[in-house]
Image (cartoon, rainbow, N blue to C red):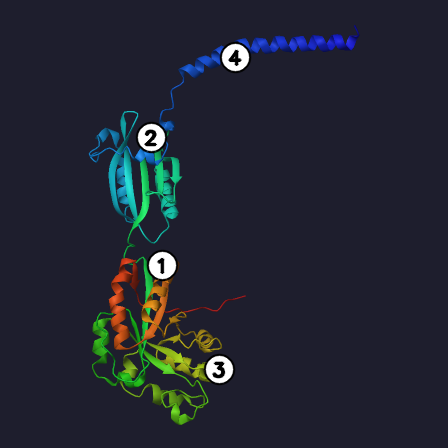
Amino acid sequence: MRPIPIAAATLGAAMVVFLVWRAVHFFPSALSRFENSPEPTRNRIHIDSSLFEQETAGSSQLDAARRDTTLDATLSRHRDSLGIFRSRLSAVRTEGEDVPLYSMEFRNGIPLVERVKEISQILQARGYLSGESSERPRAIWPWAMRVQRGDTLVALLRGRIAGDAAPGSFVLHLGFLQTEAGRMPALNGLPRGTLVAMPPEAFADPAIGAAFRLGGWDPALEVRLETSRDPVSLQKSRILLQHLRADLEHRLLSVDSCRTIPRGLVVADGDRGSSDPELSRKVVDFAKERGWWLLDATGNPASRLSEQAFAAGLGTLDPVRRQEGKVSAALLASQEQAIAEGESSLLLPLDSITVRKVVAYLPLLGRRGVVVAPWPVVHRKARRD
């Protein structure tokens, strides 16, 4: 034979002998370790509907030895922050033992996935492990999780969104504009913090100040600027482009109550007037001298009011959803916006029918977690480059 084939055959034979020798020493010891290893019984528990069907009747009185009191205290302590409005403790029987089962129903307002994330963080901070977290969107209990300490199963948690939102979860800034001349309609039932804007002549009522204080509403002076080229005789209630500062004083402070009761200025219309830089500056200066805030409710994209208020350092209210149509549709839209974004605002016509509809709708807002809150005054600061 040639030298190369002889060397290859010798090397192959040596490798076979080595592998046989390793097998003789490895497999017996590996088999022994496998047979003597503890059986991972807990890892065979899976979170599915069949496990919940084994929920033990009358198991709310679990053996104290089977309950983790630290877990009990943790969930109880964070009940409000987690939005748990109802819960119960039962058990599921697996492999001859009762495992505590915490069933939690959360309030609306925060997605379930956010609740799960918050619970997981709280438990992990206290040394617990999430052995398994299961999400089944169409199930009665769409979320469930195993809670462990090391390899030991402590409890099962499950949850769903099933309760009304907590009062105050969402905010609605509600306001009214008096679109027709006359006395202030009854505002009984409107919550505190509701904005009520009226023209100067409406403040002639001597009892109006007491009514606002008693109801807790925020009074504002309603201003209407020139919106068309109609003759002056047809625009007696509006501030015109040619009016001087003295004219504003005479028209807007026509009664004594206008000097003391209003807290802000609401510009209700005025496409031409609000876009005029000189007139908008006069209106802003008029409000600033009295320590009032300004709400631009004109809906005019060319309005200079907010720009002028910003330059003068005047407090303003953020842009508002103004609705002249159906009250129920406007309230529903504002409600959904508040739930989706945390807050919303709405201006409605000030008349008796609209007020009654709003008062009747308030309980529905409350059940969705939406409350009426005062309008925040914003003081924007100039940016420095």
Q: Which residue is mark 1?
A: 339
Which class describes the residues within 10 Å of circle 3: few (<14), some (14-19), or many (20+)? some
Q: Nearer the viewer, mark 1 or mark 4?
A: 1
- Marks 1/4: CA–CA distance: 64 Å
Residue that appears at 27% across and 66% down: 361
From the viewer's perspective, is residue 295 above or below residue 119?
below
The image quadrant of residue 23 is top right
Q: Which residue is mark 2?
A: 153
- Marks 3/1: CA–CA distance: 37 Å
- Marks 3/2: CA–CA distance: 71 Å
Callout 1 secondary element:
helix
Callout 2 secondary element:
strand
Callout 4 secondary element:
helix
Which class describes the residues within 10 Å of circle 1: few (<14), some (14-19), or many (20+)? many
- Residue 358 in picture, x, y percent from top left: 27, 69
**Viewer-proximal residue, 250 or 186?**
186
Q: Nearer the viewer, mark 3 or mark 2?
A: 2
Which class describes the residues within 10 Å of circle 2: few (<14), some (14-19), or many (20+)? many
- Amino acid type assigned to the residue bearing label 3 in the image: Pro
- Marks 1/2: CA–CA distance: 38 Å
- Residue 218 in picture, x, y percent from top left: 29, 73
Query: Can the viewer see residue 127 in this picture?
Result: no
- Residue 74 in picture, x, y percent from top left: 29, 40
Q: Which mark is residue 277?
A: 3
Q: Earlier in the sequence, mark 1 or mark 2?
A: 2
Q: Earlier in the sequence, mark 3 or mark 1?
A: 3
